[in-house]
Amino acid sequence: MSALPRAVSLLLNLGHAVDHLFLLIFAAAVTRIAADFGFQRWEDLMPYGVGTFLLFGLGAWPAGRLGDLWGRRPMMILFFIGLGASALLVAAVQNAWQLAASLTLLGAFASIYHPVGIPMLVQHAQRPGATIGFNGLAGNLGVAVAAILTGFLVQWSGWRAAFIVPGLVCVGCGVLFAFIAPKELEPPSRRTQRARVTLPPDLLARAFLVMTLASATVTLLFNFTTNGNGRLLELRFLGIVENPALLGAMLAAVYALASLSQVVVGRLIDRVPFRRLYFAVVLAQAPLLALAAFARGWWLYVLLAGVMVLIFGAVPFTDAMIARYVDDRLRSRVSGARLTVSLGLSSVAVWVLGPIVKVGGFETLMLMMALVSLGTALGIRALPPEPDGSALARLQPVS
């Protein structure tokens, strides 16, 4: 297989950015939307967004299956155009239930990217860890852009503009991708490219189980933080910084810094023992989350930056495991099945975020997240042993 054209790779990485951007516009604008629809508290509107993340998970399995059996190129065209069109639909809603339905549709289209776009990038990669790390940087820069772009658009043009502007850009990306992405000679299911590491069936099953459960808890923390950080800063910076646009810019800076951790982790995955690195990154989250639970002002900001560096840094491991252990002809289906389970379970974060904060405050939420990190770290110890990263970096894919 020849390498993807650079412009296509750039669009695939941009797709990761817009995927995460759209998932977080609602959370970034929820205070203004709640006021517009007559809700007295933003926490009461948050459950209406749960369909986004539920379909983001449940849609991944059929999306991955279609990616392998039909083709990854047509699925990515559908991703860009469908995601942009559904964002425009969100901007046109008139009540909370219409909002919930349109956000659910947006989540269905957003579910396409991870089981299709990432395998499309990795199928040509000689160093998949570095490729996944850079792709993760792109995706989480989308998180940063969501915070700052939504803040400015909401302040200057209203919350509907926060969906319209990126929606139009996303549709344009889909049209461009259709023109420049080369057609596939055969669907991935007919390819013969083998995995970089072959495990016995029992160890492969254990790796898949740990991978899925760890991915669910990592994504749970990701959803709790990225959906709640905006409200956390509003609360803990009262009397210090209260301008919504400035708070959005501060949060975007945290996400931009945290995104760089994925590039570093991606490179380390190709060079150092996988299980040891994964364990260290996840374990280090717990003490920072516990300290951040009670911090205020700028101390909170410093701790939050450290927490997000570690949470973002844990994200590339699952895709790296799939690239390492799974044949290319199956990667979209395996990725989709894993995402359906892990994202479906972690979508509960959006449902319970508001009620937890309303009853117990952010202190309770962050202490709960610290316990989740400790449990995940213990689970990672069950991953099967393997050659270290330097040995794997010298392996070439077998065709």
Image (tube, helix red, strand yellow):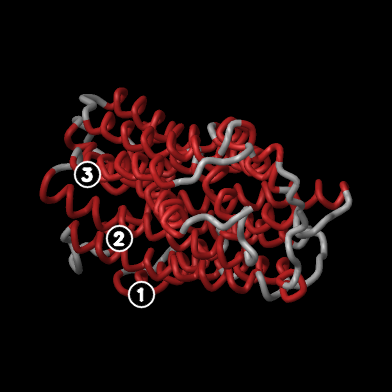
Please provide percent x and percent y for residue 204. Answer: 81, 50
Q: Earlier in the sequence, mark 3 or mark 2?
A: 3
Q: Secondary structure at mark 1?
A: helix
Q: Residue at x 63, y 37 (%)?
A: 187
Q: Is residue 28 left or right of residue 106?
A: left
Q: Is residue 239 above or below residue 116?
A: below
- Tag 3: Cα neighbours inside 10 Å, few (<14), some, or many (≥20)? some
The residue that mark 1 highlights is: 299
CA distance for labels 1 and 3: 34 Å
The amino acid on which the numbered mark 2 sits, given as a three-letter code, is Leu
Q: Earlier in the sequence, mark 1 or mark 3?
A: 3
Q: Secondary structure at mark 3?
A: helix
Q: Quadrant of residue 77?
A: top left
Please provide percent x and percent y for residue 26. Answer: 31, 42
Front residue of 164/383: it is 164
The residue that mark 3 highlights is: 165
Q: Residue at x 38, y 60 (%)?
A: 141
Q: Quadrant of residue 337?
A: top right
Q: Residue at x 69, y 37 (%)?
A: 189
Q: Earlier in the sequence, mark 1 or mark 2?
A: 2
Q: Is residue 376 visible?
A: yes
